Image: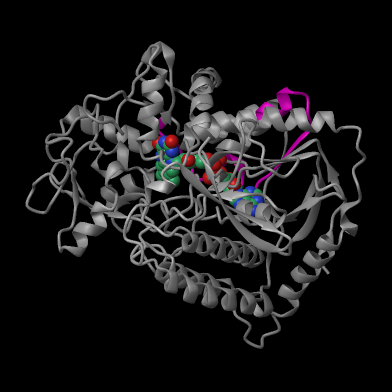
Amino acid sequence: MLQVKEQLTCDVLIIGGGIAGLMAAVGAAEKGASVIVAEKADTRRSGSGATGNDHFLCYLPEYHGDNKKEIIQEMEESQIGGCCDPELFELFADLSGDQVREWHSWGIDMKPRGDWEFTGHAKPGRPRIFLKYAGHNQKAVLTREAKKRNVRILNHHLLNQILLNDEGQVAGAVCLDVTEDIPSVQIIACRSLIMCTGNTTRLYLPKTAGWMFNTANCPACTGVGRASAYRIGARLINLDMPHTHAGPKYFNRCGKATWIGVYKSMDGKPVGPFVKKPTRELGDITGDIWMEMFEMRRKAGEPVFMDCTETSPEDLEYMMWGLSNEGNTSTLDYMKEEGIDLRRHMIEFQQFEPILVGRGIEVDKKCASNVPGLYAAGEETGNFRGDIGGSATFGRLAGTCAAEYALKNRSQASPELKKLPVVQESLDFYEQLFTRADGTGHPGWKEANVALGQIMNDYAGLEVRSENMFKAGLIYLRRLREKTRNILACTNSHDFMRCLEVLDLMEVGELVMLCGRERRECRGKHVRVDFPFTNPLNNNKFLQIQKVSGEPVLTWRNKR
Ligand SMILES: Cc1cc2nc3c(=O)[nH]c(=O)nc-3n(C[C@H](O)[C@H](O)[C@H](O)COP(=O)(O)OP(=O)(O)OC[C@H]3O[C@@H](n4cnc5c(N)ncnc54)[C@H](O)[C@@H]3O)c2cc1C
């Protein structure tokens, strides 16, 4: 039997100590709430912002002037736009400047060259919305700020289930402590819970098939927030719209906009219309606007390269500094080791596998979901995306609002959650995963993860989507999921964690297929060969999915 530790209690439980999670912790603690952060890894170096970032989306009146409307429009038309509710953009614009100034005061250098500087991710003649900053130390600083406010951080604790009380309000969570070789169960009672577990990697197979963890974003972000929220009735949104990033080929790391060069074909011709010569101010935004170009041109037999050979020495130095602040130090080390000299060599780029980012839990202007007591922030949310800027700003807001909710409900006694049927079922299942590992050949999580990725790539991928592909894909995926639940096995904490991740991913994959099947049109990277047009009736609409009486229910709503 896995050991069940004594139940912990707090006002606000935050799942995931990435950028949004740590900022939520700060916001909630400042309101006077007792706060626990349960983080799968270690908050000092976890999540997609683990090793740093260098572009912070924001509206900064002292730089942009009174131009808020124009800035919001530019955000909507940037790579993070398309799936956001306008009311959330408006709110973000109002709050993001304060967030920038606060980070700066804490020692994350938001003015590394003395003044506000907006470079990269920019279109010629249009306002610039990404502040260039030096984010290499951001996780250490945010961890320190959370601890200063008495936040309790439980590293190596991963969420598996959210628990509700009889009134349907969030009451706590089942987490697993994977610090030791054999896991133990940590049940945490809370009055509100903020989900901040990032995006979904390892749902699709990455471009380097043998290396499942060679992903552009954090490979430990595996959809638990979406899956566990869906199970308790939260509405998810925009799951049908795949997002893909791009970057150096086979070296799957984000960081496209930090490069200062021009996308070119092998014979040295620019492939996009925006810049002909490298510029530090703009970068080459072709990769943001037309990310499919890498794949489209590859299919036409034309690889695309980032060419920095005409970049000035000062701009090259600036770019290398940017890449190291963005945590792309392994890319820099690799180039050094292999003798790759950007003054002479072009670097081939590619489009990466789809992830769900800014597709997930639907929230309102208080970052609250439709389930009382459940909040979400960061890449987890379905109707807003703002990457680092969005995760920091709405993380803090989610913390404030979740704390206000929790403090109002403080008089409610914390129930003994271990007795809930869902907890008992979970404990039985964890036990089975270990007892099955009896040497009789039960498969492990890797086989299951690869099989999932194959089905997702082929039946809900970027190339072909159609009614019959989704129908077939759903049959295969459901069979795989059932079989996996029945035969998967593990022998230690690490593999146990991976087993739970794969099962969450399978649940999310099924929801992606259901939503993709419902969207009978082409939109963005959702390409239906049986409905090869964009339906104008859906222009202003989002697709939601929610579990009602045990069944998925799909609905459309207008953007707010
Ligand atoms: C190399 C790179 C460069 C980037 N550059 C930029 C940039 O310059 N500008 C920009 O705006 N964005 C950039 N991004 C994206 C940016 O890092 C993310 O948008 C941001 O980190 C999202 O914050 P988040 O809190 O939502 O998720 P994350 O920071 O990913 O945090 C999620 C956390 O949840 C934890 N977790 C996952 N599952 C569980 C579980 N079951 N239980 C408990 N905890 C769990 C994870 O360990 C992680 O700590 C970049 C990303 C990468 C990879």
Q: Residue furthest left?
A: 267
Quadrant location, the N terminus: bottom right
Q: Residue at x 62, y 38 (%)?
A: 21
Q: Residue at x 60, y 73 (%)?
A: 481
Say which quarter of the image contains residue 209.
bottom left
- Magenta-span inclusion, residue 38: yes
In the image, residue 244 lies at what x, y percent?
38, 52
* Residue 178 shown left or right of residue 420 in the figure: left
In the image, residue 334 lies at what x, y percent?
31, 51
* Residue 507 shown left or right of residue 200 in the figure: right
- Magenta-span inclusion, residue 266: no
Q: How many marks?
A: 0
For residue 49, say whether it is visible: no
Q: Is residue 224 above or below residue 474?
A: above
Q: Is residue 66 above or below residue 536?
A: above
Give the magenta-colored segment's residue range. 26-55
In the image, residue 322 lies at what x, y percent?
34, 33
What colouring does the structure picture have? one colour
In the image, residue 316 lies at what x, y percent?
22, 33
Q: Residue furthest bottom?
A: 440
* Residue 301 shown left or right of residue 493 in the figure: left
For residue 238, say whether it is visible: yes
Is 525 or 552 nearer to us in this picture?
552
Q: Is residue 423 above or below residue 166?
A: below
* Residue 123 shown left or right of residue 352 in the figure: left
Say which quarter of the image contains residue 191.
top right
